[in-house]
Image (tube, grey):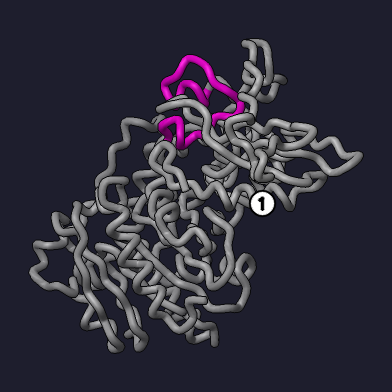
Amino acid sequence: QVKLRGFRIELGEIEAALTRAPGVREATVGVRGQGADARIVAWIAPEAGQAPDPVTIRQWLAERLPATHVPARVVVLERLPRSSTSKIDRRALPDPAPESATSALAPRDDQERLLATPWCETLGIDSLDVRDDFFEAGGNSLLAMRFVGAVRRLTGREVPVAALFRHPRFEEFVRHLHDADAGGRSLVRLRGGSGAPMILLPGLGGGLAELRPLAEHLDPARPVYAASLLDGDAPERIEDEARGLLSAIEAVVGPGPVHLLGWSYGALVAFELAGRRTAAGREVASLTLVDAPAPGRYDDVEGEFALEDLEDDDARRWSAVVRTRVKAARQYRPETWRGAALLIRGAESATADLRDDSLGWSAWVTGPLETACVPGTHESILSEEHVASLAALVERQLSLSPGSS
């Protein structure tokens, strides 16, 4: 396991996926470069008579691994170098060949050149590598809205923001643009795996960027999805938000048990989802509520966001979405939940002013309710500084859940 730009990367997971790729006989993965220049590199040896293409291999991996796990370079060798003990000799693995300014690093066609301009303007950079990851390059949920808004204006297409979360690398975003579907709520896979999946529900803004560090700190064997709530108008009721997600969950992960975790506004959505999924005869293996006041405790939530990163039209739409969700949160009065739940609070969060360790949830959870506290404010508990503590509590809860495997 290595740590790259704040994310924990399981090199073994990448190697295992590579060995399943078409035409690949064996593979190994490592990190080359230092600091901001560090990149994941894969070395592969082909099956007899096969000639796997590095770009095709990266595309294949992008459909099966989180964006953070897709190698920046794939080097094809006749065979992997071995030591006298038959182990892969990592010191003998060649560096990727230098790439010139005229190589595939630069936009290669009219579509890439068209979209390179808003990409660079949004991120505040002069040029791009077509394999750059939007979020690794400094993007966040607000900037994702700004970039996709610019793409919509340039192309005249209703591109969903979720498309950028699914394909955060520039070349892959452009390549999959024709697949974009703006309709409905959707789940974005952050990591593959086996067993009951974890589904993360975002805050008032509906963006997924803030949830990526948490996903990377959870058990790497666990499949993790996040709900995309950035596209379209916000429903006026929590119940409607949850109803729109139920079919997406069923379609993507099936009828089996799921773990639900919601942060802030997402905790209310997770709570409603838990009740509705249980009523439909589906198993909720665990329910985790992260730093969220209970229903009836939202009168002090203002829902103000920094909108300076968005164009006027985007800012107005974003502001309207946030105001609608704040109103929905204030009006939400659900049925009680008879299952178990874990509530995690931020030690420096404004929710501490509620002077109630359960933040009011004890009135709504009639089953076992465990409360815990982690360092950080409402926002910083998801940051790299504190997210490991949050993830450890979540993993402990999941290990005790009957449907965790």
Q: Nearer the viewer, residue 42 or 310?
A: 42
- The residue lying at 40 percent from left, 27 percent from top is 35
Is residue 132 placed above or below 295 in the rendered structure? above
Give the residue drawn at x 52%, y 24%. 118
Does residue 128 show up magenta in the picture?
A: yes
Indicate the secondary structure of the residue bearing disc 1: helix
Q: Residue at x 78, y 46 (%)?
A: 25
Residue with the mark numbered 1: 17
Answer yes or no: is residue 113 visible: no
Which of the two residues, 50 or 308, is positioned nearer the viewer here? Answer: 50
What segment carries the magenta color? 118-139
* Residue 396 as seen in the image, left or right of residue 171: left
**Residue ranking furthest to the right:** 49
Q: Quadrant of residue 86?
A: top right
Q: Based on the displayed image, in which of its 4 quarters is residue 174 positioned?
A: top right
Q: Residue at x 49, y 54 (%)?
A: 228
**Does 339 sit above or below residue 87?**
below
- What type is the residue that disc 1 sits on? Ala
**What secondary structure predominates along the stretch shown in magenta?**
loop
67 horizontally vs 175: left or right = left
| Residue 200 in the image, given as x and y percentages of width and height | 44, 61
Name the residue at the top extreme.
101
Q: Nearer the viewer, residue 232 or 15?
A: 15
Measured as percent of width and height from the top left, residue 13 is found at 58, 52
Where residue 280 appears, as percent x and y from the top left, is 54, 85
**Image height of 31 relative to 402, above or below:** above
* Foreground residue among 395 and 314: 395
